[in-house]
Image: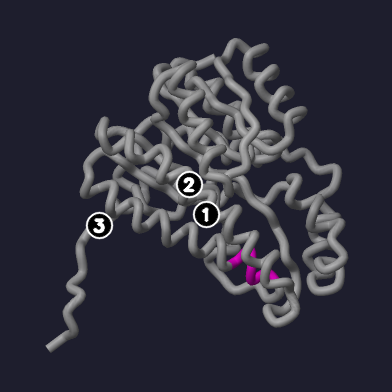
Amino acid sequence: MSTELQGQVAIVTGSGRGFGRAIATGLAAAGAAVVVSSRTQSEIDEVTTSIEGAGGQALGLLADVTNLADVEALRVAAESKFGPVTVAVHNAGVPWPFGPTWVVDPDRWWRAQQVHVLGAMHVISTFVPGMVERHDGRVVVISSAGGTRVAPYLSGYGVAKNTQIRLVEFLGHEGHDAGGVTAFAVHPGDELTGISDLTMNDPDAKQWLPWFVEHLQTKIGEDSSAGFKACADLVCKLATGRYDRLSGQYLTPTDDLDAKPDSVFEIPSLAPPP
């Protein structure tokens, strides 16, 4: 156990498995008290037991990030047990729907936006006001390289991830103006997760993205521990505050944070050019 994040209180959505579990475990190992949250009780129990068994502090709670009341309940429970949340990580996500934009079910497409984007907004609206009041806090949204380019037949995922990246840019600017609140969008890496399993077993993914399904299948059996650790290490670095100067940026585990230029927060004129 480390003491680097001692005194910090973190919430991690979608932390029952995969990258979310790695992030929660990493934050706890660095000394933070961590609220583990997902929609599956057995996963929550496993992660919290693992953290506590290693000497860390954890609280596990069921929550659906698309339900504001659930997210608010996380805040109340976290504050009651550990104190104010200083690090909020939104990791919950889904991979679907797959297919042409005119073929996919609009309601399912919108559901993807709710998990990724509305969920992020629920985390922001629930935890950032307290951070602003204390002039201290960090928000990390686990996004994806899928939000930086067009991948045909993945519009639901791509639009949601692109929106997350831009949302973090807004929060970075506004948090800078408020003083002491920073935000980061993070590409976690390319490891097999529960989302990967959903993709590989989805009939629409097999129809429209057979190359991607095949790519994921080639990774079955690979050791993902290094990739998960790299993502967790990045989030832990951001949680320390040492890289607050990068607020609003999209970052990856392979980035040299020390070499990246500072964010520049300038308010552009909304008036048309003369």
Q: Which of the two residues, 204 or 23, is positioned nearer the viewer here?
A: 204
Q: Circle 1 sits in a helix, a strand or a loop, which is it?
A: helix
Tell me residue 19's x, y (percent).
Answer: 64, 40
Q: Is residue 125 visible?
A: yes
Q: Position of residue 227 (x, y in %)?
A: 65, 41
Q: Is residue 266 left or right of residue 229?
A: left
Q: Earlier in the sequence, mark 1 or mark 3?
A: 1
Magenta region includes residue 123: no
**Foreground of the two, 72 or 91:** 72
Q: What residue sits right under mark 1 in the picture?
A: 118
Dot 3 crowding, Cα within 10 Å, few <14, some 14–19, many 20+: few
Give the quadrant of residue 111.
bottom right
Instruction: Give residue 164's position: percent from left, percent from top.
Output: 49, 57
Q: Residue at coordinates 55% horizontally, 16% vertically from top-left?
A: 57
Q: Main secondary structure of the magenta part?
A: helix
Which span of residues is magenta-colored?
154-158
The residue furthest bottom is: 274
Q: Which residue sits at x=49%, y=47%?
A: 141
Residue 93 shown left or right of residue 169 in the figure: right
Residue 264 numbered tag:
3
Q: Nearer the viewer, mark 1 or mark 3?
A: 1
